[in-house]
Image (cartoon, grey):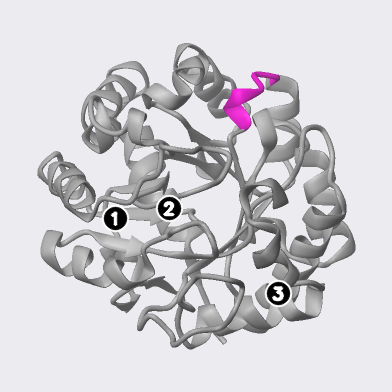
């Protein structure tokens, strides 16, 4: 039976409930000095507010080596009652100290890391060396492309992610730099490496508001994660509803996901996690009806993050 792999164990997709399909409770990068999401008290407060607004699940796309708070996630899930899904994988190389990447060179090494984190437990982070598992397993693999293309690092990570997918069944979530490069990603992951398109989640596409491109990649069968109702990505808000309308009209309502994608300390808080399942969801219902809201926040995430785990 397909299940969603949360930090507290595998759950029936029907139990996932209202889901923020792309967000971050913890994140740190040398590209964002002083903007680390590293405060467990703030993370718990946000999750409690999210739950009070009706949120029941959150998928954190923070991959290995970026301060994802693996040892804290299970406790936060228990304390707040929110299902949490953690990520393995790697981001673009610019988000890492070179020493970390030197310890993870080669697609084979990366594939073993990803499979371990999906099946045994998250490694403690630091220095690129393996530590003791943090006691929770990842439920998806995060990878990243570049601006309108894929460099060698991105290709190595995607080759490893595909191997880990074939070994475990895990979904693969993709960061697209400024919303670009989705056709290249699909060509590699699905065309060359044989990952079924319905196991791929394409993130940030609404940062590049090319509706023809959106329809093209939706026709592949992949999920489109439309994210950014936060102060870090406010530029996506003004065309989110036009994007939704175009994709729904083209018959792709069943492939769409929503997430807040808060990535910096400055962006945490108002409107915060509750906005997605409160104010934004209410407006979607007024514009499109309750059925679409339920699809975007409940039914589609239940399919996107469920896997027949090997």
Q: Is label 1 in a helix, a strand or a loop?
A: strand
State the residue in front, 288 or 67: 67
* Image position, residue 300 (x, y; %): 44, 50
Q: Is residue 168 left or right of residue 295?
A: right
Q: Is label 2 in a helix, a strand or a loop?
A: helix
In the image, is residue 133 above or below residue 296?
A: below
Q: Earlier in the sequence, mark 1 or mark 3?
A: 1
Q: Is residue 95 left or right of residue 253?
A: right
- Residue at 87% of width from left, 55% of height from top? 152
* Image position, residue 130 (x, y; %): 56, 83
Q: Are marks 1 and 2 in contact (CB under 8 Å)?
A: yes
State the residue in front, 249 or 193: 193
- Residue at 39% of width from left, 51% of height from top? 299
Label 3 environment density (alpha carbons within 10 Å; few <14, some 14–19, many ≥20): some
Q: Earlier in the sequence, mark 3 or mark 2?
A: 3
* Image position, residue 116 (x, y; %): 57, 84
Front tag of 1 and 3: 3
Residue topped by disc 3 = 103
- Residue at 49% of width from left, 71% of height from top? 125
Residue 260 visible: no
User: Magenta part of the protein: which range?
Assistant: 205-210
Residue topped by disc 1 = 57
Q: CA distance from mark 1 to mark 3?
A: 33 Å
Residue topped by disc 2 = 301
Front tag of 1 and 2: 1
Residue 258 counted in the magenta span: no
Image quadrant where residue 229 sits: top left
Label 1 environment density (alpha carbons within 10 Å; few <14, some 14–19, many ≥20): many
């Amino acid at each position: 039976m397909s299940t969603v792999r949360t930090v507290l164990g595998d759950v029936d997709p029907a139990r996932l409930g209202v889901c923020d399909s792309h967000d971050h409770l913890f994140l740190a990068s040398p590209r964002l000095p002083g903007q680390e999401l590293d405060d467990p008290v703030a993370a718990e407060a946000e999750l409690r507010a999210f739950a009070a607004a009706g949120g029941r699940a959150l998928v954190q796309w923070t991959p290995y080596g970026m301060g994802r708070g693996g040892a804290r996630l299970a406790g936060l899930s228990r304390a707040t009652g929110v299902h949490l899904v953690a990520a393995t994988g790697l981001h673009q190389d610019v988000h890492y100290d070179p020493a970390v990447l030197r310890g993870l060179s080669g697609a084979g090494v990366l594939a073993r890391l990803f499979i371990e984190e999906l099946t045994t437990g998250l490694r403690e982070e630091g220095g690129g060396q393996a530590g003791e598992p943090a006691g929770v397993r990842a439920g998806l693999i995060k990878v990243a492309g570049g601006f309108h293309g894929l460099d060698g690092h991105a290709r190595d990570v995607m080759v490893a992610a595909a191997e880990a997918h074939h070994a475990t069944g895990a979904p693969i979530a993709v960061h697209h730099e400024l919303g670009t490069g989705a056709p290249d990603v699909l060509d590699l992951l699905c065309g060359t490496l044989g990952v079924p398109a319905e196991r791929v989640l394409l993130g940030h596409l609404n940062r590049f508001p090319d509706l023809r491109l959106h329809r093209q990649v939706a026709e592949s069968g992949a999920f489109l994660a439309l994210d950014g109702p936060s102060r870090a990505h406010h530029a996506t808000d003004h065309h989110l509803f036009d994007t939704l309308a175009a994709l729904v009209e083209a018959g792709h309502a069943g492939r769409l996901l929503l997430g807040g994608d808060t990535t910096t300390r400055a962006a945490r808080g108002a409107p915060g996690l509750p906005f997605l399942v409160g104010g934004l969801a209410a407006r979607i219902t007024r514009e499109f009806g309750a059925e679409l809201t339920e699809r975007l926040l409940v039914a589609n995430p239940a399919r996107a993050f469920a896997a027949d785990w090997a």
